[in-house]
Image (cartoon, rainbow, N blue to C red):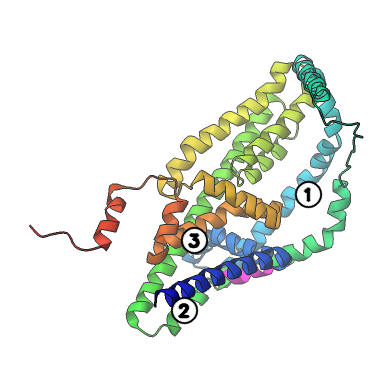
Amino acid sequence: MHKHSGGNRSLTVAAWIVAGLAIIAVLYFARTVVIPITLACVMALVLAPVVRFLCRLGLPRTLASGVVVVAAIAFAAAIMVRLSAPAAEWFSRLPTAMLRLRYTFSETVRALQDFREFTQNMATISPGQGNESEVVVQGPDLAQVFLTNTGQLLTMIVVTTILLFFLLANSYLFLLKTVHILPRFGDKKRAVEIGRDLQVEVSRYLFTITAINLGLGCATAATMALFGLPDPLLWGVLAATLNFIPYAGSIMTATAILLASVITFMTPLDVLLPPLAFIALTALEGNLITPMLVGRRLTLNPVIVFASLLVWGWLWGAAGLLLAVPLLVICKIFCDHIQPLQVVGEYLSSLPPSPENARQPEAAGQPADAD
């Protein structure tokens, strides 16, 4: 009896492992199809509050969805057209920026070179080191990669746009279908409550995060203009976009601003002021504004966030990095509303267990003795 039960448990674990590997394989090899669908779903949740606002003003849902989609696409296209030339110019000046960076901080570079020479001399003393030839791997040209993938990128944009419109115009269709197929009235009522709570809470969170990132972008653009850094709009858009990537996004933006400052300014102090000001803005946003507007309940476990960035970045590249945290938040909110999955939601949270949650296992077991 026990052996049979153990065998069934092993088969169940093996089935879950095979199913997980199959899902990962589908996400990786079918990413050209899955990425537009996922991106459209996340954007639909972000733009859903705007559609609801227009519907309250009297617009039909289909018309409101079309207006929102057209406005979002027009805004993104205008930003890309406006910033494509400055971004290409700054990218072409990247080698110059590296040379100027080395010249501006020559003392630090000289100390690093001395340390490198010391380590190389120590390496020649250690046994087992033969004469090795240095191999330089040249990466592909960025413009060539972009031109090669232009057709695929345009196809993904068109598919995402069309799917986004249908999702916004028919947001409650899947919920109505689910309610229709459930047999009992209690299950129907529970499904409606969970569905509405999920949609409203996820939409509110993603909309708030997007608004915070746009605010950070505006503050960054204003700060860079105050310091006299050219193309402040470019740095604001870069900060707003990369801020969807925790930890690494702010580092990449600060590095880009530092390289631009090296080209623009001459003294080390003038070079360091713009990136330091941006770091101060991100610290203010991450430690005060976001916790105040979003709330502590939706703060995520940093270990889980970092692992999610690694996994989604490996699966989908840049798109995976941008979607990793929104997908993780959606998963946490979903787990918080489903009773059997609340344990998973607890692990995704960065908050310590509350005394009420600590007493739940006792309540789930045998009742306490009566007085």
Amino acid type, residue under disc 1 in the picture? Val
Q: Which residue matches tag 2?
A: 178
State the extent of the magenta-drawn residues as a range.
Answer: 161-167
- Where 255 falls versus 313 (above or below)? above
Q: Residues within 10 Å of mark 2 (few under 14, many from 20)?
A: some
Amino acid type, residue under disc 2 in the picture? Thr
Amino acid type, residue under disc 3 in the picture? Phe
Find residue 74 and report its horizontal and vertical position in percent.
Answer: 70, 57
Disc on the earlier residue, 3 or 2: 3
Q: Which residue matches tag 3?
A: 53
- The residue at the point 53 percent across, 53 percent down is 207
Q: Which labelled disc corresponds to residue 81?
A: 1
- Where 126 falls versus 138 (above or below)? above
Secondary structure of the residue carrying numbered label 2: helix
- The residue at the point 47 percent across, 64 percent down is 199
Q: Residues within 10 Å of mark 1 (few under 14, many from 20)?
A: few
Q: Is 89 colored magenta in this rendering?
A: no
Task: Give me the C-alpha separation between circle 3 and circle 1.
Answer: 29 Å
Residue 27 in view (yes/no): yes
Disc on the earlier residue, 2 or 1: 1
Q: Nearer the viewer, mark 2 or mark 1?
A: 2
Nearer to me, 3 or 182: 3
Q: Nearer the viewer, mark 3 or mark 2?
A: 2
Q: Quadrant of the N terminus?
A: bottom left
Task: Give me the C-alpha separation between circle 3 and circle 2.
Answer: 25 Å
Characterize the magenta stretch by its predominant secondary structure: helix
